[in-house]
Image: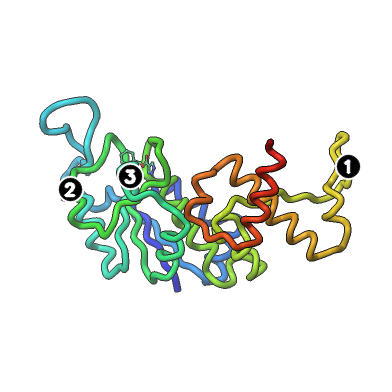
């Protein structure tokens, strides 16, 4: 069973996320386990101090390595100890898939201006969820929990649905439609109501390629494209002229 331990100074930020929706269901049903530990419980001083002034001066506070490393070591054994930081390896679906195969992930969320650099020696990797700065690592830790938990068999209703979504085939998703057939003058593409499954599949592939070409062309460099994809792309190219 995939098990997570989130280390944080704000355990109550994590808790509600694990009690609702699909993730809450997965926990209830025993498909995953999610534990939250308060880093402050690993202090040993009277003031329960987790941060201190940066050596060399400057603004803000830095989390003390002794407290954070005590918190990490209390969770062992673990397959991965992941520090969430904008300086980490960018999170992509292949890394999500790799992490989802582990048994125990420890996710370390920092607050303040950062964590003492010596903590790096006590983690297995540093991961970033994007090129922006949060106020703490909690949301990034939850992003890893959500992205990996949905790959655990049984967590999503339909076992097919995650195989079909955008990043598992390397392209952005095709556009989806539901009722009503016309909304404020906007019609559902006719092919989707035609009942012709082959045509629907081709239309979806073309629209996924179109969106990817328009919004994230760099993704097309790394995805493996079939002969048919190349033909569809050539058609889109002609449309564009
Ligand atoms: C954090 C110092 C950690 O801001 C993030 C983050 C952004 N992408 N991935 C993670 O984490 C919180 C902020 C400052 C260390």
Q: Secondary structure at mark 1?
A: strand
Relative horizontal placement of residue 134, taking residue 32 as reference (left or right): left
Pick whichever, 84 or 42, lies toward us. Answer: 84
Question: What residue did someone put label 1 on?
Answer: 182
Residue at 17 percent across and 32 percent down: it is 53
Mark 1, ligand 1, within 8 Å: the answer is no
Separation (CA) of disc 1 from disc 2: 59 Å
Q: Is residue 192 above or below residue 187?
A: below
Q: Residue at x 28, y 64 (%)?
A: 75
Please give the residue where the numbered disc 2 appears in the rendered image: 65
Q: Is residue 183 above or below residue 98?
A: above
Q: Judging from the image, what secondary structure is the residue with disc 3 in?
A: strand
Residue 103 is drawn in which quadrant? Answer: bottom left
- The front one of 156 and 10 is 156
* Ligand 1 lies under 8 Å from the Cβ of mark 3: yes
Tag nearer the camera, 3 or 1: 1
Instruction: Write the residue at 27% across / 52% down.
Output: 41
Residue beneath disc 3? 85
Q: CA distance from mark 3 to mark 1?
A: 45 Å
Element assignment for label 2: helix
Measuring from the top left, give residue 144's x and y in whole percent: 44, 55
Along the viewing direction, whichever of 174 and 209 lies nearer the viewer: 209
Distance CA(mark 2)–CA(mark 3): 15 Å
Q: Position of residue 22 (x, y in %)?
A: 60, 59
- Mark 2 crowd level (few <14, some 14–19, many ≥20, 10 Å Cα): some
Give left or right: position of 65 versus 171. Answer: left
Residue 212 drawn at (x, y percent): 59, 46
Which quadrant is home to the N terminus? bottom left
């Amino acid at each position: 069973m995939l098990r997570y331990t989130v280390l944080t100074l704000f355990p109550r930020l994590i808790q509600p996320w694990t009690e609702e929706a699909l993730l809450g269901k997965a926990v209830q049903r025993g498909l995953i386990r999610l534990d939250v530990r308060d880093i402050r419980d690993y202090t040993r001083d009277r003031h329960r101090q987790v941060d201190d002034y940066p050596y060399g001066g400057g603004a803000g506070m830095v989390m003390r390595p002794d407290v954070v490393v005590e918190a990490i070591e209390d969770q062992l054994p673990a397959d991965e100890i992941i520090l969430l930081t904008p300086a980490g390896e960018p999170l992509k679906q292949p890394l999500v898939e790799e992490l989802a195969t582990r048994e125990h992930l420890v996710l370390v969320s920092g607050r303040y201006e950062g964590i003492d650099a010596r903590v790096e020696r006590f983690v297995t990797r540093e991961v970033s969820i994007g090129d922006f700065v949060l106020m703490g690592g909690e949301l990034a830790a939850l992003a890893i929990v959500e992205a990996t938990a949905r790959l655990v068999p049984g967590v999503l209703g339909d076992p097919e649905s995650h195989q079909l979504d955008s990043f598992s085939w390397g392209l952005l998703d095709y556009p989806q439609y539901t009722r009503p057939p016309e909304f404020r003058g906007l019609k559902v593409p006719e092919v989707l109501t035609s009942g012709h499954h082959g045509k629907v599949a081709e239309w979806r592939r073309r629209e996924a390629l179109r969106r990817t070409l328009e919004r994230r062309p760099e993704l097309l460099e790394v995805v493996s494209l079939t002969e048919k994809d190349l033909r569809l792309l050539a058609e889109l190219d002609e449309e564009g002229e």
